Image (spheres, rainbow, N blue to C red):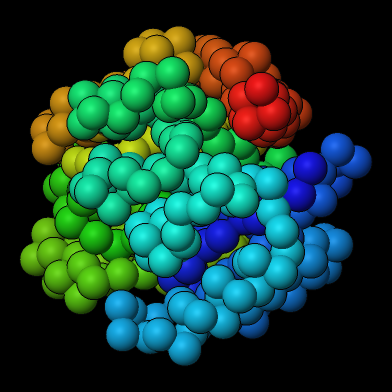
Amino acid sequence: MRVAQVLAGAEQGGAENFFVRLVSALNARPELEIKAFIRNHEHRLQALQANGVTTAGFRFGGRLDWPGHWQYRRALKQFQPDIVMTWMGRASGTTPHSRDYALVNRLGHYYNLKYYRHADYWVGISRGICQHMIDGGFPAERVFYIPNFADETPVTPLPRTSFATPAEPPLILAAGRLHENKGFDVLLHSLQQIPDATLWLAGSGPEEASLKALCRQLGLEQRVRFLGWRNDVTTLMASVDLFVCPSRHEGLGSIVMESWAHGCPIVATASQGPGEAITDGVSGLLTPIDDADALARAIQRVLDSEELRQSLIAGGERVYREGYCRDHIVAEYLRLYQQIANQRAA
């Protein structure tokens, strides 16, 4: 079965990282012939090709980029795919519906659905996103729930003194795009109430300057390390006492799966994805969105109790193994592709 995977993503991002993981895993399956069609980001081209994935790069410009669109569509037609799976809006909008292949749009957030209505099938990475599509008029029998898996590569923890961090105090990690939706400002207010803790904040984005200014305003300059965009978040997770996801909006929160897979207890706000995935008190602790006091109390509970910490680690590892691990998710995609092939052959 010939499957095209199409991503016109940003230079860095969680969805972009997962694209490399999933496409590489699918490419290892003998039932599939995979080709990746991506934006010309050299590091992603190299990562896919190093994993044996046949990959082609394109501009994926805006609506007026007719030459770029023509080049991509010509290459897609030459590949003669049975299935085309597009990731996010730009790739989905640029890829036409065709009788020659089944078009699958994969949605990782609660996007405006008008850009996805021309597809034949849809994948949502959370049940909430799937319901969003069904409520928006997509046929339920063609909407499928398949979440993400983590980077399962074993890692070696960094020294706790990395990034000029004091050796003794508790160490907290948060990671993601520095954007209002991620709620890192709330986490900084919470950190005021946990005077002994140091925070590693990994990420970059439009809120970086305002978050650094807030740090100064709150007197946290000595306890927050801005690490920039990192490709070793799982290593960071293995190095700290606790991971915190304070998001206001989060489609799935793949970072939750990362924490489960690498034995790092998690405290998260009950935003869309984490609120669906985490069972409070079993696989993590959940707090209300935008409630810095509740977030601080939950963080302190984990830091104060090794018993709770180990219980959350064990609960997260169990949930990950049973429903989110790489082998499970790859098998789900294989079942979906085979079901699509059977329907088209009928």
Q: Is residue 135 above or below residue 21?
A: above
Q: Quadrant of residue 38?
A: bottom right
Q: Quadrant of the N terminus?
A: top right
Left or right position of 102 against 142: right
Q: Position of residue 174 (x, y in %)?
A: 39, 49
For the point 38% across and 86% down, the residue is 65
Left or right position of 150 against 29: left
- Total number of numbered labels? 0
Q: Quadrant of residue 252?
A: top left
- Residue 308 in sight in this render: no
Q: Quadrant of the C terminus?
A: top right
Q: Is residue 23 above or below residue 273?
A: below
Q: Position of residue 32 (x, y in %)?
A: 81, 43
Residue toward you, 166 or 301: 301
Q: Position of residue 87 (x, y in %)?
A: 48, 53
- Residue 189 in sight in this render: yes
For the point 21% across and 24% down, the residue is 135
Q: Is residue 189 above or below residue 90?
A: above
Residue toward you, 213 or 282: 282
Q: Is residue 90 above or below residue 101?
A: below
Q: Position of residue 108 (x, y in %)?
A: 40, 43
For the point 64% across and 14% down, the residue is 322
Residue toward you, 181 or 342: 342
